[in-house]
Amino acid sequence: MKTAKRYFVEGRVQGVGFRLFVERIASELGLKGYVRNRYDGRVEVYAIGEEVVLEQLRGQLQAGPPASRVDRVEEHAASIEKHKTFHVEGSL
């Protein structure tokens, strides 16, 4: 059964290729949703998929790309929105 999660990633996660890293991983995992920078320095990830696949995504968020430093990944249940792909959205 599909579910949706919203993640907020803290640390050195902007200006290091984090959004493109997330877009690639999420697309490879077959997830739908988006990733975007937030004004407060965090990265927000909204993903729709099977729970086991979302757990894989969370593990990748915690690891991050080589230039990043992830201090914390906050996870929240979310309502399912309609998205056809996983993509990078403009900053919020």
Image: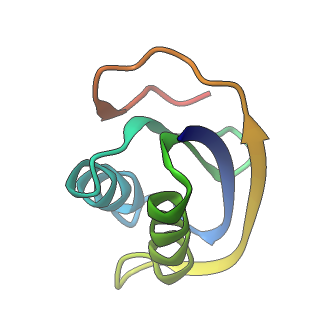
Q: Residue at x 53, y 41 (%)?
A: 1
The spot of residue 27 in percent (x, y) is 25, 48
- Hey, which residue is sitting farthest front in the picture? 1
The spot of residue 61 in percent (x, y) is 51, 69
From this view, report whether residue 77 is shown above or below residue 52: above
Report the number of numbered marks: 0
Q: Residue at x 56, y 56 (%)?
A: 51
From this view, report whether residue 69 is shown above or below residue 10: below
Q: Quadrant of the C terminus?
A: top right
- Hey, which residue is sitting farthest top in the picture? 82
Q: Name the foreground residue: 32 vs 36.
A: 32
**Residue 37's image quarter?**
top right
Question: With 87 as the anchor, is 8 left or right in this view?
Answer: right
Question: With 75 as the anchor, is 23 left or right in this view?
Answer: left
**Residue 81's image quarter?**
top right
The spot of residue 69 in percent (x, y) is 55, 82
Q: Residue at x 40, y 20 (%)?
A: 83
From this view, report whether residue 35 is shown above or below residue 53: above
Q: Name the foreground residue: 65 vs 57.
A: 57
The spot of residue 76 in percent (x, y) is 78, 48
Q: Residue at x 76, y 43 (%)?
A: 77
From this view, report whether residue 64 is shown above or below residue 21: below
Give the image's coloring scheme: rainbow
Question: With 57 as the anchor, is 26 left or right in this view?
Answer: left
Q: Name the foreground residue: 33 vs 30.
A: 30
